[in-house]
Amino acid sequence: MLDNLESNYDCANAGDDLHQLKQELESLREQQAEDKESQETINRLENQISFILNKCDINH
C-alpha cells in the first residue's frame, strides 16, 4: 500500500500505483474479512484510489 499520498503526488506513477492499489483492494474483498482493521484498510485503499483518480483527472 502506498503511504502518504499528498498534493505533490506525481501522476506519472498513477498507472502502476492504481493497478497495485486495485489488486490489494480486490484481494482484501475476496477474503471477506470484516474485522475493523480490514475495513479500515479497505477504506484507506478506496480513498487512495479516489485521490489518484481525482488528482490526475483520470476517468474511471
Image (cartoon, rainbow, N blue to C red):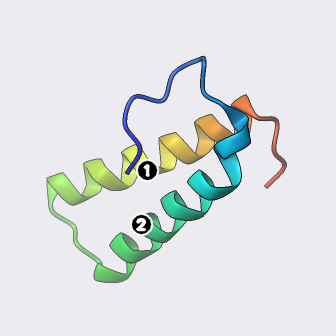
Residue ID for mark 2 = 24
Q: Would you identify the image quadrant in which residue 30 lies?
A: bottom left
* Residue 31: image tag: none
* Relative to 13, residue 55 above or below: above
Q: Which residue is drawn at 39% across and 76% down?
A: 27
Residue 10: percent from left, percent from top? 66, 31
Q: Which secondary structure, mark 2? A: helix
Q: What element does badge 1 sit on?
A: helix
Residue 45 pos. (x, y %): 43, 50
Q: Which of marks 1 and 2 is nearer the N terminus?
A: 2
- Across and down, in percent, residue 24 comes to 42, 66
Task: State whether residue 46 is above or below residue 55.
Answer: below
Q: How far apart are marks 1 and 2 (CA)?
A: 8 Å
Q: Which amino acid does label 1 sit on?
A: Leu
User: Toward the viewer: 18 or 10?
Assistant: 10
Can you identify the residue that label 1 sits on? 45
**At 70% across and 55% down in the image, what residue appears?**
15
For the image, the number of numbered tags is: 2
Q: In this view, does 24 lie above or below 8?
A: below
Q: In this view, does 1 lie to the left or right of 50?
A: left
Q: Label 1 crowding class (10 Å Cα cut-off): few <14, some 14-19, many 20+?
A: many
Amino acid type of the residue that numbered disc 2 sits on in the rendered structure? Glu
- CB of mark 1 within 8 Å of CB of mark 2? yes
- Indicate the quadrant where residue 9 lies: top right
Mark 2 Cα within 10 Å, few/some/many (few <14, many 20+)?
Answer: some
Could you say where residue 20 lies in the image, as x and y percent from the top left?
Answer: 51, 62
45 and 9: which one is in front? 9
User: Residue at 15% of width from left, 62% of height from top?
Assistant: 35
